[in-house]
Amino acid sequence: MNNPHFNDALPRLYEAELSPSIVSARFGLDPAAIVDFSLNVNPLGPPSSAVAAARATLDSCNLYPDAQLAALRKALARRHAVDFDQLFFGAGLDDVIKLVLHAWTAEGDAVLIHVPTFPRYELEARLRGCDVVAVQADPPWTIDVDALRAQLASRRVAVAFLCTPNNPTGATIATSDIEALAARFRDTLFIVDEALGNPLDDGATALERREPNVVVLRTFSKASGLRACGSVTRSVRVRCSRSPNAAGRHST
């Protein structure tokens, strides 16, 4: 049976995206002269150490990778001062968003988002059959924390997505505001997407040690220039079924 929630009303992603090779061919440009910011990727590319580590794994690319990603897990657990099993990895944050929603929501549950924001949250929530509650601030490029709080107080919300810095506006939510929301609304899982944040800043990861209903999403694909894996630090015990080789090989 087809998914009844898969229809033309769903948000559409990446339809207008053009790769540098397409732009080069269409406009007669040198590919080396094109800087692609369309997906917020690092125009400088990956660090040379990452390229060398990737090349070193090619001789064993016929093998399935370590399902626990132990080396990466240990390094990130040490970096963020979280437990080894508080880390969950996926093949990009799109993958992680989908898996966490499937683990934490059921059809008919309410999912809160602030708009405009990354459309993947709404897409995956609607495919799951959830009721999407969209909160828009005035002006729309800001994030109205008071309006979010009012919606959370008015109904039971299973999951709330907080994108900070927000994609596409760049607006941020103070970590203290996130902590206050998580402390007041314990039945809501707050997913804090920091994909566009500075990886040198701790951001909301410190909340993992205090708030049991906070999940923090981070990625290697932006500042680090590694379009290889999305990661999520978490304190809630979410068990997601996952293919052991979906995230590929990683070196730190």
Image: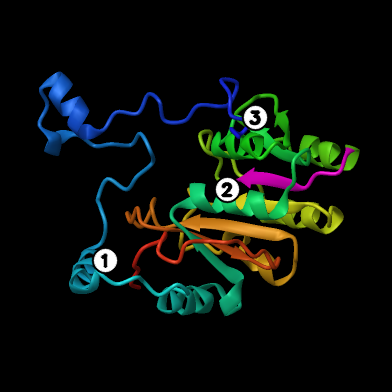
Q: Which mark is residue 248?
A: none
Q: Quadrant of residue 142?
A: top right
Residue at the spot x=51%, y=79% of the render? 78
Residue at the spot x=58%, y=59% of the render? 203
Q: Is residue 67 above or below residue 159?
A: below
- Please identify, in this view, whether the residue under mark 3 or under mark 1 is nearer the observer: 3
Residue that badge 3 annotates: 4
Q: In the image, is 199 to the left or to the right of 136?
A: left
Magenta range is: 155-163
Q: Earlier in the sequence, mark 1 or mark 2?
A: 1
Confirm whether the magenta stretch covers residue 160.
Answer: yes
Mark 2–mark 3 Cα distance, whole angstroms, equals: 17 Å
Mark 3–mark 1 Cα distance, whole angstroms, equals: 42 Å
The disc labelled 1 sits on which kind of residue? Ala
Q: In the image, is 108 to the left or to the right of 164?
A: right
Mark 1–mark 2 Cα distance, whole angstroms, equals: 27 Å
Helix, strand or loop at disc 1?
A: helix
Residue that badge 1 annotates: 50
User: Within 10 angstroms of label 1, few (less than 14), some, or many (20 or more) residues?
Assistant: some
Q: Earlier in the sequence, mark 3 or mark 1?
A: 3
Where residue 223 appears, as percent x and y from the top left, is 38, 53
Residue at the spot x=55%, y=64% of the render? 202
Which residue is more in the foreground, 197 or 122?
122
